[in-house]
Image: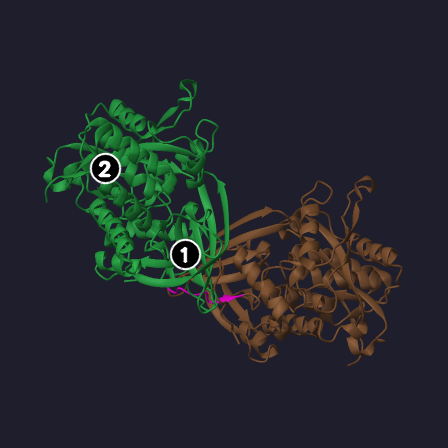
Chain colours: A brown, B green
Amino acid sequence: MANTFLDRTALNDLLNGACFLGGGGGGPMSGARPLIDLIVKEYDGVTLVPYDSLDPELPCAVVAGIGAPDAATHGPSFSSAPKDAFLKLQAVSGTTLGAVLPGETGAMNSIIAALVAAQLGLPLVDVDSSGRALPTLSLAAYNLATEPTVLTLANQPVTDEQQATAVIETRTAPQADSVVRALLTTQAFEQEGAFSTWLMTAGQLPGASVDGTVTRAIAVGAALREARAAGDDPVEAVNAVLDGQLVRLSCGTLTAFSSHEGGGFDGYTIVLTDDDGHVVTVSAVNENLLAWRSDSDAPLAAAPDTLAWLAEDGTPLSNTDLRGLTAGTRLHLLGIPAAPILRTPLLAARFAKELAGIGFFGQAPRLD
Amino acid sequence: MANTFLDRTALNDLLNGACFLGGGGGGPMSGARPLIDLIVKEYDGVTLVPYDSLDPELPCAVVAGIGAPDAATHGPSFSSAPKDAFLKLQAVSGTTLGAVLPGETGAMNSIIAALVAAQLGLPLVDVDSSGRALPTLSLAAYNLATEPTVLTLANQPVTDEQQATAVIETRTAPQADSVVRALLTTQAFEQEGAFSTWLMTAGQLPGASVDGTVTRAIAVGAALREARAAGDDPVEAVNAVLDGQLVRLSCGTLTAFSSHEGGGFDGYTIVLTDDDGHVVTVSAVNENLLAWRSDSDAPLAAAPDTLAWLAEDGTPLSNTDLRGLTAGTRLHLLGIPAAPILRTPLLAARFAKELAGIGFFGQAPRLD
């Protein structure tokens, strides 16, 4: 594969595709749009590279936003926090970082990685942790190469006096995540920050990442854009890009939405009434984790499979974006089988723990 | 049916049978034993009457303990609080109460009703709200006759200066429950109290209670006592009393126990490892509400069916009693189909809401 320069159209496609593939999480659309404007205005765009075009010895690291997505809808634009976190990791590690790895696929986090790559003149690598968005650091495939033993966290200050960074050294991703969440609850971070970690070489990426995720998100976004212009069914358009793997879980009207921000997470309970009158309830911790239908004793779908929203007109929506919907908007709830790497024992056990945290102690159903 | 005088043997059988049928809740064994001693010492016992032997116009009311069961393991013995609540209801209603209705079937609450009947020289009526213990007032069959619009709450003071009562007037059981739980979190109550409500006539009991529940609990307790003496299988002994309705959900070793007291409730997560190596997880809010097995996407059982513990030697255990178990104790988790009245739409909807409160939004499986 060759390098690709992502211009405004490609970045907008990435935004839309990543929002859909994020499965409710990955940050709000509204938080990502100013970052695309910034990339295009200052740098025209960003260069996307396949990991196998990089020197296997090249040091790279992940950068992403973390915290409660609702906070990102009302906080300042994340123009400097991600770069600050990335450069702090470079400084404390004494390693010159040669490429930027996206943390996950999601509206804000796909664009944040692109922004830092543009700001620092580095290539953006066409991989990520999972091909979806993730509620905790523990679940990322990157942990299969290295746990996030050194992690930097930066805030997005409104004034210089408010600037704050932290450097965290722990042994495991669950420890790192718990420390980061505690920091996010402080006044210095107000439920959101940018982090950088998983410093590794390009040669470590196979077996510890999902390949081609940026390209896939751009293709999904382009399919949605083209379907909209042509008046085609957006679900079928996305399904074609995803090789027919999309599962229609439900289609109906949003009838209830509740959220609870705290501890560096947003918990959501989202209720649809489907066209047959069943009540479909989605439980989310940032990302959608479980979908239930009122006539079945087992979930319709569960993480690590992705549970994604698409408005009937083809607009992708993260959970925090649902808040702004007009009453009566019809939504598709669509399922995407998890990347196989998320079923490896370490990650599968951690996903099971996330589900247990919201009261599910059984064997999660699989879409594939 | 004739009246029955419950002596120490019958009260001990009631304690054991009610503890089992309480399905994890209903208060701890340790909190009930001093109350049996008090009944026998002061009054020899108590008179149990079938509801249909009472004048249909006779006013009666429910009395029971409420709150976090763990609190009842370390608080003062509930010798006066239930009587105080019952007499306060009589005073504020201006009605002379002629009989005592048990709130639910459970170690403490079956005995508390017997104590008040003995203390006031009134008959104990052989009915209750459900034939099991219930996490909230909302779920009681008594609500089908009258919601608990006037409710009195009393504490168990250590000194006279600590005495506290409250009279609550609301329109519905969920409202009454929410106000009671708020009161229970105060210093005056320290997570537990006794309440009296559901003032009704004996003639209102059919269609708004479960009949014969005290007799059934005594029969279960006697079966456990006799099985133990004879070395018979306690599960089979109980199953015979319950007309073969008992369902063996799991049998294994307790491998994890966690609890969280707060808001006038105890939340529990209790984990067994069964004989085939499956992990069985029971989620409880005071009472057991859901049981999961690690190899199934649907629950093994769910409320309103009862999920009850029995040690392999035939000792019944409430959830708070599990805390004291020797490591490696083998436990049966047994299911009992719910009394049909708990499936009436008002109560079924309220049970579904309890399950939603711990993350289950599907259709609960049924044991019958």
In percent of width and height, residue B325 lies at: 45, 50
Considering depth in this image, is A204 or A80 the residue closer to the camera? A204
| Three-letter amino acid code of the residue under disc 2 | Leu
> Which subunit holds the residue at mark 2?
B
- Residue found at x 32% / y 44%: B106
Q: How many marks?
A: 2
| Residues at discs 2 and 1 in contact (Cβ within 8 Å) | no
Considering depth in this image, is B120 or A337 the residue closer to the camera? B120
Mark 2 or mark 1, earlier in chain:
2
Considering depth in this image, is A150 or B7 the residue closer to the camera? B7
- Residue found at x 47% / y 33%: B185
Q: Which residue is mark 1?
A: B290
| Three-letter amino acid code of the residue under disc 1 | Leu
Q: Which residues are magenta?
A: A295-302
- Label 1 CA crowd tier, 10 Å (few <14, some 14–19, many 20+): many
Magenta-drawn stretch contains B116: no
Left or right of B45: which side holds A245? Answer: right
Numbered disc 2: secondary structure:
strand
- Rendered image quadrant of residue B70: top left
Res A328 visible: no
In percent of width and height, residue A339 lies at: 62, 73
Picture quarter with the N terminus of chain A: bottom right
| Majority secondary structure of magenta residues | loop
> Which subunit holds the residue at mark 1?
B
Magenta-drawn stretch contains A297: yes
Res A267 visible: yes
Q: Which residue is mark 2?
A: B101
- Label 2 CA crowd tier, 10 Å (few <14, some 14–19, many 20+): many
Left or right of B325: which side holds B228? Answer: left
